[in-house]
Amino acid sequence: MDEAAILKQKIRNVPGFPKPGIVFRDITPLLLDPAARAMAAQSLADAFRAARPDVVAGIEARGFIVAALVADRLGVGLALVRKKGKLPYSTVSAQYALEYGTDTVEMHTDAVRQDQRVLVVDDLLATGGTARAACELVEKLGGRVVGCGFWIELSFLNGRARLAGRDVCALVQYESE
């Protein structure tokens, strides 16, 4: 069995969450399995090792877990991308579109330095709006996005299109809901 199939077995499908018609891809069973968790973290780190990131930027909230594991394996710093109003220090912000309206993410102004190489990481790529906003934050701070990594991609939502021109890696793909 290939790695993606092993990881996919550890992802729980929760129909009807958070609303009817949605199938939530739950990574908590994967997190509970030390071997699967290590495999997923190592695979994502290996996919971007040659890009030589200086920092891994993790997107709230499950992305914090994934990013911390990847940053540890790469031996680099960890920066946090949070929803507006959650960070205590001076921040930069970027808006992204939701189904009905917009939302905002922020980073501390000292999270990324000029010309640092940054890997943006989240647990799941759906429409790509949050990941794109995270990339914008890194670039506002003078960093260079060297890639975007995810454990899961909902490819039917075409999130890669919002990350066009960037190196994107997702370990597990779902072609339909």
Image: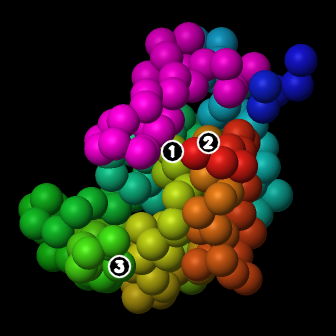
Between residue 43 and residue 98, name the one nearer to us: 98
Q: Residue at x 42, y 44 (%)?
A: 22
Mark 3 burial class by Cα count in 10 Å: few <14, some 14-19, many 20+: some
Q: By what rule are the colours in the image chosen?
A: rainbow
Question: Please, what is the three-letter code of the amino acid marked with disc 1?
Answer: Asp
Query: For the residue marked with disc 3, what is the amino acid?
Result: Ala
Q: Earlier in the sequence, mark 1 or mark 2?
A: 1
Q: Secondary structure at mark 3?
A: strand
Residue depth check, mark 2 versus mark 3: number of the one nearer the observer: 3
Q: Is residue 167 rendered to the left or right of residue 88? A: right
Quadrant of the rendered image containing residue 163: bottom right
Closer to the camera, 171 or 134? 171
Q: Earlier in the sequence, mark 1 or mark 3?
A: 3
Q: Which mark is residue 123?
A: 1
Q: Quadrant of the C terminus?
A: top right
Magenta segment range? Answer: 6-33
Label of residue 97 in the image: 3
Mark 2 lies on a secondary structure that is strand
Distance between the alpha carbons at the discs numbered 2 and 3: 22 Å
- Residue 35 falls inside the magenta stretch: no
